[in-house]
C-alpha cells in the first residue's frame, strides 16, 4: 500500500490551475484519489495524474461561471493575485478572508 503524501495546500487556501484558466478556494482534501472511475476515465490517458497524491475539492471559478472542481495536487499552484473570489458557496464554508486564505466557518455559524 502506498503511503499518502502530506497535502501541500490547506483548507481555505486560494489556488489556481497550472494549465487551465480557473482558480478557487480549497474546501476539502483527499489524501489520494477518491472520485469515481467514470471521472478518472474521462481524463485523457496521457494527461491523467498519479492517483497516489492529494486531490483537492475547490469552490472554483473562471471568467464565465462558478462550479466545484476536483484537482490533483500536481495541477495546482498558489494563487497570489489578491483578486476576490465570487463563488456563491464561499459563505457556506468560510467566515472571512484573511490575506491569502479563507477562515473556516465555525460549525453552526452563518455570521
Image (cartoon, helix red, strand yellow):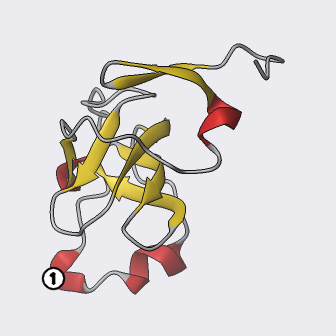
Residue 35 image offset from top left, x and y in percent: 52, 61
Q: Is residue 105 above or below residue 34?
A: above
Residue at the spot x=39%, y=48% of the render? Answer: 24
Q: Nearer the viewer, residue 18 or 73?
A: 18
User: Residue 31: image x %, image y %?
Assistant: 40, 37
Q: Is residue 40 left or right of residue 15?
A: right
Q: Is residue 96 left or right of residue 4?
A: right
Q: Residue at x 54, y 51 (%)?
A: 87
Quarter holding the N terminus is top left
**Residue in view at x 50 percent, y 49 percent:** 86
Query: Could you tell whether 29 is left or right of 105 in the image?
Result: left
Q: Position of residue 64 (x, y in %)?
A: 44, 74
Residue 78, how many percent across, how many down? 20, 38
Above or below residue 33? Residue 85 is above
Relative to the observer, which residue lies in front, 3 or 111? 111
Q: Is residue 43 visible?
A: yes
Q: Quadrant of the C terminus?
A: top right
Instruction: State the residue lying farthest toward the right.
Output: 108
Mark 1: few/some/many CA within 10 Å (<14, 14-19, 20+):
few
Asked if 54 appears above or below 72 in the picture, the reply is above
Residue receiving disc 1: 46
Quarter of the figure with residue 11: top left
Where residue 107 sits, quadrant-wise, is top right
Q: Nearer the viewer, residue 50 or 10?
A: 10
Residue at image coords 37%, 26%: 10
- Secondary element under disc 1, as helix, strand or loop, is helix
Query: Is residue 53 visible to the viewer in this orientation of the structure?
Result: no
Residue nearest the observer in this picture, 80 or 53 = 80
Amino acid at each position: 500500500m502506498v503511503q499518502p503524501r502530506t497535502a501541500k495546500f490547506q483548507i481555505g487556501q486560494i489556488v489556481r490551475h497550472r494549465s487551465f484558466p480557473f482558480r478557487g478556494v480549497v474546501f476539502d482534501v483527499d489524501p489520494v484519489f477518491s472520485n469515481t472511475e467514470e471521472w478518472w476515465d474521462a481524463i485523457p490517458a496521457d494527461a491523467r495524474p498519479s492517483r497516489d497524491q492529494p486531490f483537492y475539492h475547490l469552490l472554483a471559478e473562471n471568467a464565465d461561471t462558478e462550479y466545484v472542481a476536483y484537482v490533483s495536487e500536481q495541477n495546482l499552484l498558489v494563487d497570489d493575485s489578491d483578486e476576490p473570489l465570487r463563488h456563491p458557496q464561499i459563505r457556506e464554508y468560510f467566515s472571512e478572508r484573511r490575506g491569502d486564505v479563507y477562515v473556516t466557518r465555525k460549525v453552526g455559524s452563518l455570521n
